[in-house]
Amino acid sequence: MSANAQKVVLITGGTNGLGKATAVHLAERGYRVIAAGRSASKRAELGALAKTKRLPLSTVEMDVCSDASVHSAVQSVMDSYGAVDVLVNNAGVGYMAVVEELKMEDFKQQFETNLFGVLRVTQAVLPAMRQRRSGRIVMLSSVAGLVSPPTYGAYSSSKHALEGLSNALRLELYPFNIAVVLIEPGYIVTNFQHTAKDLAQRYVESAKSGPYGKIYAGAWAGASAGRKKSKSTPEDCARVILRAIEAENPRARYGVTPLATLVKWAKRLASDAIVDAFLRKKYGVTRDDTETVGGPRAKGV
């Protein structure tokens, strides 16, 4: 533990779900952890847990969608601890709706949190890491950054973008001894799903009388079945993140859950047609044979 006691880890979205599990796990291993989050009550709850367990874990207020909030939080960490050795970009949100119906403001907010929020915090900590020629940046991506199920258009595209950003950073930061690692979980039950369900509620309600009713029903059924089958916990993800942090030469990406392994190999070995067929079956996507306005649908269209 003494070897890790001097290492400072900043975790965004660190007071809930995967972020909270990671914060506690790393603190138990002797890392000095700062869990960032917006909710004062969740920060207080985690602070009380850390006090009870006597963990080197503190919290800081941060909204990754605000330049001022990110600057203030990172500066506070720098002033208190001198450096950020490891950044875990975990904060995220999920808007689940079909692309045609998704409100533009929701699509923008999806990227504001999952991509631009990551960029804000990363840019804030990088100058000091680069000057020290040392650091590690862990990006919480998703299996949805590899494949795109129905209703996942916004969320999945934000994670695909995160994958691209991370791939570029990994090369750009290599000269400065800063490693960039992607973590790609599959289904893990956290409060994220409850938040996503709340955000999607207005779309689901309107879909009952719309053309995408079956798509929504199949998407929710498939996702629910996947979560019920999954045995993986937030703590499992935290252990993978610890491995990524402590590896001397970390891999570019680490999967979490058996689904992540399956999707990774499917993307490498299977054709798009095979992957699409698998996703259609999993989420109940079938051809709509209803006649179009003006007559039957043309073949091949």
Image (cartoon, grey):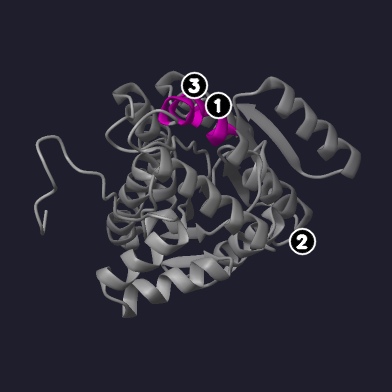
Viewer can see residue 177: no
Horizontal arrangement in the rendering, residue 149 relative to residue 240 (left or right): left
The residue under label 3 is 69
In the rendering, which numbered label is found on residue 1? 2
Measure the C-alpha gap from mark 3 to mark 1.
5 Å
Q: Examine the structure image and report whether residue 202 is included in the region drawn in magenta.
A: yes
Give the quarter of the image for residue 54. top right
Rendered position, 299 above or below 77: below
Horizontal arrangement in the rendering, residue 114 relative to residue 299 (left or right): right
Circle 1 sits in a helix, a strand or a loop, which is it? Answer: loop
Q: Specify the principal SS of the magenta part.
A: helix
Q: Which residues are magenta?
A: 195-207
Marks 3/1 in contact by CB < 8 Å: the verdict is yes
The residue under label 1 is 62
Viewer can see residue 278: yes
Q: Earlier in the sequence, mark 3 or mark 1?
A: 1
